[in-house]
Amino acid sequence: MMSHAAYVFTSYGIAALTVLGLVAWVVLDGRARRRELAELEASGIRRRSAAKAPGETP
Amino acid sequence: MSENSLAIRKFSDLANPTRFLALADRLLPWLAGLTALFFVVGLWLSITTEGDYQQGETVRIMYVHVPAAWLSMMCYSVMALAALGTLVWRHPLADVSSRAAAPIGACFTFLALVTGSLWGKPMWGTWWVWDARLTSVFVLFLMYLGLMALNRAIDDPARSSKVSAILVLVGFVNIPIIKFSVEWWNTLHQPASVMRLDGPTIDPEFLWPLIVMAIAFTLLFFTLHVAAMRNEILRRRVTALRRLAARAAGRGARTQ
């Protein structure tokens, strides 16, 4: 039988791990996608709307 | 005013993913900061307020359990609204919103189930019972997982969005069932004590940490949701650009 405090600590611990896991997933996913976009752009592949450099637009 | 401006003036301007990205970049630091602030205050209140005369220290589990349970339902409601946006208005960001919300909702539902179980063991004497409230929340958890699996199974968002939106709307039936399960059926779970027509029935000692933690969790949800939507838009851009590159490479190979 655990003490009541142990149940409370376990709850807060699991909550903290879940929330931190979510935050880490969102941050890492965003970084990976930005890296991929940068790589594509570096190899000369751009979105149609961004195909022209800002200075070229009429 | 030029049409190329990225400023958001009308609600419909949000439909432009590029504008949404600009707005997200501007909003996210504030949302994240506010979330952290509310969590600091909320956790401080959760730790320092007194224990309940019956529940003892375990009442503190409620400050995580109740907001997580609320959010699990709110997240699904956001997805249902987004599903309507996909089916009725064909809003370009609706499917992005619904898809980005599913893993977040699954995590909050998981938290509600686990913390509820950790409270149930010392207070009810059991980890789990198959009563109406607990079972309907478990079904909600399974629905989140099912939607995530469906979204992953169909690569092309243009094809998966409609199927996924219909499934979300069908599953929305479960939300009122969860909400009113404690009144319609005889369950072990106690009935609502905060969101009542006749006002909250819990002591202010417990109400304050609960409210602050609920705001903190809600802010956390919106921060994560906006960030996940941004990631989903970027993911779709990468896919589109790769397809473009493959097509260009194919043309190049043919002309040689």
Image (spheres, helix red, strand yellow):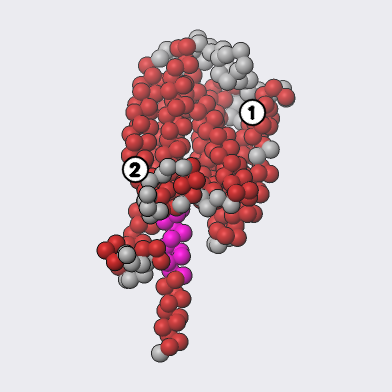
> Mark 1 is on which residue type?
Lys
Find out whether residue B246 is within the magenta segment. no
Q: Residue furthest front?
A: B1
Q: Secondary structure at mark 2?
A: helix
Identified at 42% across, 79% down, the residue is B249
Tell which of B226 and B200 is nearer to you.
Answer: B226
From the image, tell me which residue sits under label 1: B179
Identified at 42% across, 42% down, the residue is B9
Q: Secondary structure at mark 1?
A: helix
Find out whether residue B237 is within the magenta segment. yes
Q: Residue furthest bottom?
A: B256
Q: Position of residue B30 (x, y in %)?
A: 34, 36
Q: Position of residue B34 (x, y in %)?
A: 35, 31
Of labels 1 and 2, earlier in sequence is 2
Q: Nearer the viewer, mark 1 or mark 2?
A: 2
In the rendered structure, find residue B135 and report the number of the disc placed on it: none
Q: Is residue B192 visible?
A: yes
Q: Residue furthest left?
A: A55
